[in-house]
Image (tube, helix red, strand yellow):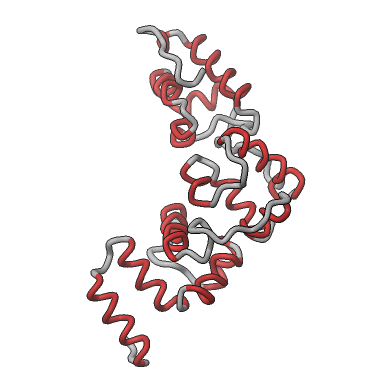
Amino acid sequence: MAGKKRPNGYWNNPENLYKEIDRFFQENSQYKELPSQRVLFSLGYSALTRGINQNGGFREVRTKLGHKNGEKVKKGDWKDLEYTLREAREIMKKLDVVTFPNEIYLRKNGYSSICNAINRYHGGTISFRKLLGEKTRNSPGTWESLEFCLEHAKIFLSENQEYSTLPSIQILRQKCGNGFVDSVYKNHQGFSVFRQKLRVYLGQASEEKQLEGMLEHYAGVSE
């Protein structure tokens, strides 16, 4: 079990480490290669991460396993709708939920790959829920929520650190899907106002500065 306590010195024996790695793959069949330390932590395998670090670290252990870069599926699998639906149902079982979670919850639990696939190939979360046979939901965990969109933008910037602020609409549609972009226009006053709100959300600007920027926007005054 992931949370089982090991005796002192347990990880000093490499055989124990590889036995635990085998167990991880048996319990998490969606992974084809050893994932990152962050993912292992999110899945409850903190002890395994300590064992890996005590035996040369992730790069050395991956090399010994014949793994290349920690990818959990072969390139192109996520484009297959049936494959993605199967993975989604497996994730729901592991998370013990009856409806497909929102994107923020999935990413916090280490499932960024399926989020990226759904946005890129399968029409976004709302459309994907329909493909799963679920009814769409208007809740704080959907694009209608400003906080949800701000958190989504924050995650995007943390995972794409080449951007210091949100890039062009074309790039956002490519990387985030249409759901996020369309919602900012429809529900959150467009990207000029949304970027200002995002700066406040990220702690990069005060509320007073945000108000000034919004007044300038509505008055048609350029910065």
Q: Residue at x 51, y 40 (%)?
A: 110
- Seen as rendered, the residue at the extreme bottom is 220
Q: Is residue 70 above or below residue 46?
A: below
Q: Residue at x 47, y 58 (%)?
A: 152
Measured as percent of width and height from the top left, residue 205 is found at 26, 68
Quadrant containing the C terminus is bottom left
- In which quadrant of the rendered view does residue 195 lie? bottom left
Q: Residue at x 53, y 52 (%)?
A: 103
Q: Nearer the viewer, residue 40 or 98?
A: 98
Measured as percent of width and height from the top left, residue 130 is found at 70, 56
Q: Can residue 85 be spotted in the picture? A: yes
Total label count?
A: 0
Q: Is residue 123 above or below residue 56?
A: below
Q: Residue at x 40, y 77 (%)?
A: 193
Q: Is residue 162 above or below residue 192?
A: above
Measured as percent of width and height from the top left, residue 88 is found at 65, 43
Q: Is residue 168 above or below residue 142?
A: below
Q: Can residue 162 be spotted in the picture? A: no
